[in-house]
Structures are given as structure tokens and as C-alpha cells.
Image: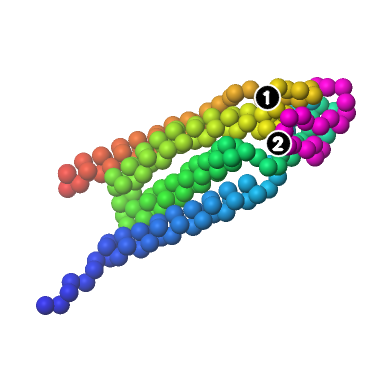
Amino acid sequence: MSARPSSPLSRSGLVWRIVAGSVVVGISLLCWNQIARNLGDTLYFPLQYGGEHPLPSPHGGTATVTSSQITDVTVGLKHISAQLQWMLGLQTAIQFVLFGAVILTIGVIWVRTSSGRPFAPAVTRSLVALAILFAVAGTGNEVLQNFINAREEFEAIGANSTGGYYLGTLFSLSGTSLLIAIGIALLASAFAIGARLTRDTEGLV
């Protein structure tokens, strides 16, 4: 008995798994490289100054003033703490996870559409998962950015805003990730409706 040849669907599924795995590995390597670069470079961030001296220096931290205007200074922070390193690494990882999820979701939609099944359940599941990921991880990344700002200020000028320095920003959330998640969820619901209509149409044939 001869072995049954593999179907085109199984071959395309294997190719898709290989491509998806390659994308995950590639994004992981890019993420690791970006984290290493971020932690190796000088960390620049803005501070505002309300003191009397035109070119002040921060107190209580390892920061150095790299540029100065009337009320704004750009601080270059070196030798950051392990806590800030972990926070920056986590922020970069979340960004790359979101990027990878978008690429993989687009890949799922493209594969299903090219095979003549644009309303396959896998498409809806991928969109729902992406919406949840943006709502949770994206919003968490915005919250993390606020803690990073506070930690940068602390490591630059110490526990108190001595020398007239202050960060000039309050805890805030833009809500962009939630809006993106809502948009993706609406798109997922549209695909779910399309899948239901497709099933109903096939049942009538």
C-alpha cells in the first residue's frame, strides 16, 4: 500500500506553522536586542525647572543635564537601578508582544482568506484574543509608563524635588489601547456575524 499523499490544506497548515514560529523567534530576538540597547544607552527624559539658576544640576541621583532651556531641561540618566531596568525591559517586551500578536493575527486572516474561508472560527478567535491583549497589556503598558516616569524622576533628583526640579507630568491614561481593543472587538463581532450567515447559507443549499 502506498502512503496517502498529504493534502494541500495540511501542507499549507505546516507552512503556516513554520512561518508563525519564525515570526515569533524573530520578534523575540528583536525584543532582546532592543532591551539590551535601551539598558546600555543613556536614558534621556525631560524635567522642568522652577529654580533661580539657569543651568542647574539635579541632586540625589546620577543624572547629568545634557541640554537646558528657560524652564525645561533634558536629563541623561546613567547607571540606573535594577528596578528601573526591569521596568524598562518589561515595557519593551509588552510592546513587542503586541506587535507580534498583530502580525500573527494578520497572518491568520490572510491564510483563511486565501483558502476561501474568511469567516472561519479561527479568525474570530484571533481577533477576540488580540482585543483582550490590547485591553489588558496595552493599558498595563500605559500604567507602567507612569511608574517609569516616577522612578526616573526619583533616580535623577532623589526623594524630594530639591533644586527646583519636578517632572511636570501627573498620572494619566490616554485610553488609546482601550479604543483599539474596542475597534478590534467590533471587527471580531462582524466576522462572527459573517460566519453565522455563512453557516445559514450553507444550510439552505
Give the residue at the far left of this rendering: 1
Instruction: Report x, y in % for residue 186.
Output: 40, 34
Residues at circles 1 and 2 in contact by the CB criterion of under 8 Å: no
Q: Mark 2: which secondary structure?
A: strand
Type of amino acid at the residue the image marks with label 1? Ala
**Of helix, strand and loop, which mostly describes the magenta segment?**
loop
Q: Nearer the viewer, mark 1 or mark 2?
A: 1
Q: Is residue 85 visible?
A: yes
| Residue at 79%, 22% in the rendered image | 164
Q: Residue 39's spot in the image, x, y percent? A: 63, 46
Q: Position of residue 65 (x, y in %)?
A: 80, 36
Q: Nearer the viewer, residue 196 or 92?
A: 92
Quarter of image, res 131: top left
Q: Residue 114: in sight, yes or no?
A: no
* Location of residue 62 by image quarter: top right
The N terminus - image quarter: bottom left
Crowdedness near tag 2: few (<14), some (14–19) or many (≥20) residues, C-alpha within 10 Å: some
In magenta stretch: residue 46: no
Res. 45 mark: 2
Please say if 5 is above or below 169: below
Camera-nearest residue between 161 and 122: 161
Disc 1: CA contacts within 10 A as few (<14), some (14-19) or many (>=20): few
Nearer-N-terminus badge (1/2): 2
Label 1: which secondary element: loop
Which mark is on residue 123? none
Region of the chain picked out in magenta, as a range: 50-67
Mark linked to residue 159: 1
